[in-house]
Image: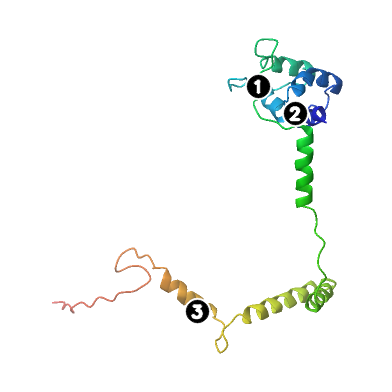
Amino acid sequence: IAVESLVTRASWPDADRRWVRRTLEPWFKEGWSVDAVLVAIDTRPDGTRQGRPRSRSQVAHEFLRARMMVWTGDGARLARPPLAGMSLGEWFRVNRRNALLHARRSGAALTSEGERARAESRALAHRRDPVERSREKARRRTQALDSLLVPGQEAPSFADSWRLVAELIPVPRVCSACGHVRNEVTRPAHRVA
């Protein structure tokens, strides 16, 4: 499973799985995860990059062996993994717990109001005329919004919203004699002699 995951995530469809397994067997026995191997392929233990990615002319397991050699401490011991991993049993337990948490829950029976709403929705969904469906949807939306009004008050109009915007947002003026407001300046009449 780990080898298949590594080959898939590294995008090596041409890799010989047996040789990759043989190459990585000691690493997996030491507790290295697929994530740790992928990090080790790209970086050295000091955090610097290892170089160019694998070209199609390189054999996958030879490329892998060359990259992982950097991670052998003294030649006999393997370095600590760059990422902490988990065992297959731990992964299975976490995966099973997440599956149970996110499993589809059985729905409770609908009330009579829910059944009526479902029937109305299905009746509207099967209507062939999209214009009529749209009008019905707009009518229901307007009815729902009007039900939120305080009794005795009317729904605000577009003019009300424009007036509210005009009060809240000041109109920028270029100068006192320019802009949206016209200022009439009274001047004494001049006589031409």
> Which residue is nearer to you in this view: 118 or 161?
118
Query: Who comes first in sequence, dot 3 or dot 2?
Result: 2
Give the residue pinned by disc 2: 10
In this view, 66 is above or below 86: above
Name the residue at the bottom extreme: 152
Tell me whether the residue at label 2 lies in contact with that at label 1, contact meaning CB atoms closer than 8 angstroms.
Answer: no
Task: Please rate how many residues cluster around mark 2, counting C-alpha atoms within 10 Å: few if below 14, some from 14 to 19, many from 20.
Answer: few
Q: Are marks 1 and 3 in contact (CB under 8 Å)?
A: no
Label 1 packing within 10 angstroms: few (<14), some (14-19), many (20+): some
Other-residue count near label 3 (Cα within 10 Å), few / some / many at <14 / 14–19 / ≥20: few
Element class at badge 3: helix
Q: Earlier in the sequence, mark 2 or mark 1?
A: 2
Residue position marked by numbered label 3 in the rendering: 160
Q: Is residue 138 above or below residue 24?
A: below
- In terms of secondary structure, where does tag 1 sit? loop
At x 81%, y 21%, the residue is 20
Q: Looking at the figure, which quarter contains the C terminus? A: bottom left
Identify residue type, mark 1. Arg
Identify which amino acid the numbered label 2 is placed on.
Answer: Ala
- Residue 2 visible: yes
Residue tagged by mark 1? Answer: 80
Q: Quadrant of residue 115?
A: bottom right
For residue 24, the mark is none
Q: Nearer the viewer, residue 157 or 89?
A: 89
Picture quarter containing residue 135?
bottom right
